[in-house]
Amino acid sequence: MNIQEKVPLAPLTTFKVGGSARWYALTETEFEVAAAVDHARKHSLPLFVLGGGSNLVVSDAGWRGLVLHVAIKGITQHDEIFDVGAGEDWDGFVAHAVANNHAGIECMSGIPGTVGGTPVQNVGAYGQEVRDSIAGVRALDLQRGEVVDISADECRFGYRKSRFNSDEPGRFIVLRVTYRLKAGVQPSLAYADLQKYFAERNISAPTLPEVRDAVREIRRSKAMLIVEGDPDCRSAGSFFKNPQVTPYLYQQVLAKADGTNVPNWP
């Protein structure tokens, strides 16, 4: 593991702004992640874990401690199970799954960042969430000082949350994520934007690649797709959540909507 000094962080984020890391470690194996954590502890350095940099704004002052950049790569497949390194590009993995005719994450095409970030906030878009496909997470438990395998149930997924960002933030560093996808099934078309997209093109049964392309096209039309050289798509991710209300309040909203469609997800 090579620990570098004064490494600019702006190029490592989707916003492309910010200062430098006082110390920086690019970690490509589980051993290197553990070694970087150990180094930070021995030298009393504040530790920041960096993935794809897509939900991050870096101060011009930079980071005074150690930035641990998780870059563990690799995709292995056993039937419908995909074991993926946390440092793999998320959209690249979606493309890989679609090319292998496996459904379950196609509607999350075009989301920036790396695989390791997906279980943290239970990433979701266009009618799909990763909690519906994640079988387990392998992580470094900073509290126990060991690598642990966490089942999907143990992740305690909720709407844009998990144990990693809600119950025990800062305790785990995600190393690998295992997904259970579905071979040879129809893609998901639960989202209104997708239904409209294919209805306008008179496509009644789109393929997985067609759904992936449609999602990316829709996202690009909203400046939500990272495109090299396009400054309009620079952002630090989503800044909103859909409101969560009781069934009773939802019925009250419906009553006042006067027949207007009120999109909802129980």
Image (cartoon, grey):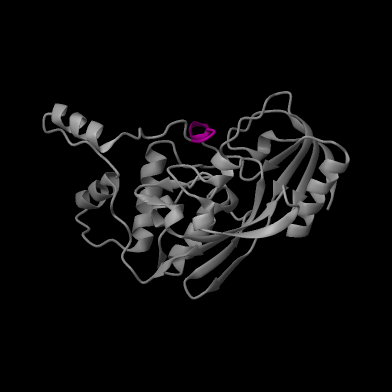
Q: Is residue 45 above or below residue 191?
A: above
Magenta region, residue range = 231-237
- Give the residue drawn at x 70%, y 24%: 60
Q: Position of residue 174 (x, y in %)?
A: 63, 52
Q: Position of residue 58 (x, y in %)?
A: 66, 29
- Tell me the quarter of the picture where residue 203 sits: bottom left
- Looking at the image, which is closer to me, 28 or 47? 47
Residue 18 is left or right of residue 161, and the answer is right
Residue sitting nearer the eye, 1 or 155: 155
Using the image as rendered, state which of residue 80 and residue 154 is in the foreground: 154
Return the residue found at the far left.
Answer: 259
Please state the total of marks drawn on the protein image.
0
Residue 131 placed where, x, y %? 45, 54
User: Is there any visible trace of residue 29 in the rendered image?
Assistant: no
Q: Is residue 35 magenta?
A: no
Judged left or right of residue 226, residue 44 is: right
Residue 256 shown left or right of residue 49 in the figure: left
Residue found 43% across the figure and 63% down from its top: 98
Depth order, front residue of 45/115: 45
Give the vertical position of 109 relative to 102 (above or below). Answer: above
Is residue 196 placed above or below 182 in the rendered structure?
above
